Amino acid sequence: MAQLFHRSANSLARVSIAAVAITLASVVWAAYRINDGAFVTDVNVARDQPVPFSHKHHVSDDGIDCRYCHTSVETSPFAGLPPTETCMGCHSQIWKNAEILEPVRASWQTGRSLQWTRVHDLPDFVYFNHSIHLHKGIGCSTCHGRVDLMPLTYKVNTLYMKWCLECHRNPERNVRPREQVFNMAYAPPPDQEQLGTRLVAEYGIQRLTDCVTCHR
């Protein structure tokens, strides 16, 4: 009986199978890379705002505390955004004719709130409580990065579930003394592991990883 396939058919089949496997693996790898990239996560991407607000100027240069604008961050799930009245408390006296602040003055005159673009925007199915994290010794900069050095605000972390779980499983790596929560320049000490272990016990921190902790 005549041979139906050329002798090279077996080699071609092996090469084809290997090529398909490599292609599939490359597609999966590329999908993961894209999912973790700035195109999807907006990490390191400054969002357009009605006013180009500089945290660096207000916090680092002028020394304004986080809680002056984010008034509910210690007592509420939400950090809160300042009403226009808070802005005008200063800007009715200084830079009161600056063109860049015209949207603020218009908001004050019309009573319409400024429509800020959320930088840290969690999905609606995710519950996050700012106050409990601060009470347990998690600092602002742990999640938001050095906002006090940002001329324009951007995310430094993905806020993906796996990122949150890393902290929930190992809170001692990030917990700090409560009096340091609002210290944006705080750096973990060399003995962070020992300090964290002590604070986890002292603050009654639980390693909550159950779905209902965040998905309610």
Image (cartoon, rainbow, N blue to C red):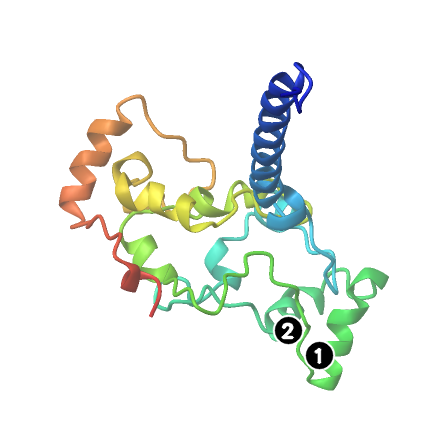
Q: What is the quadrant of the N terminus in the image?
A: top right
- Please give the residue where the numbered disc 1 appears in the rendered image: 108
Looking at the image, residue 178 sits to the left or right of residue 154; the answer is left
Q: How crowded is mark 1: few (under 14 residues within 10 Å), some or many (20 or more)?
A: some
Looking at the image, which residue is at 25% across and 57% down? 210
Q: Do the residues labelled 2 and 1 touch (CB within 8 Å)?
A: yes
Answer with mark 2 or mark 1, whichever residue precedes in sequence.
Answer: 2
Name which residue type carries label 1.
Trp
Q: On screen, 196 above or below 121?
A: above
- Residue 211 percent location from the top left of the image: 30, 60
Q: On screen, 186 above or below 80?
A: above
- Pick the front one: 32 or 22: 22
Q: What is the quadrant of the C terminus in the image?
A: bottom left
- Pick the front one: 36 or 65: 36
Name which residue type carries label 2.
Thr
Helix, strand or loop status at disc 2 = helix
Residue extending furthest top? Answer: 7
Work out whether residue 177 can be spotted. Answer: no
- Pick the front one: 63 or 145: 145
- Please give the residue where the numbered disc 2 appears in the rendered image: 84
Helix, strand or loop status at disc 1 = helix
**Mark identifier at residue 143:** none
Looking at the image, which residue is at 30% across and 34% down? 173
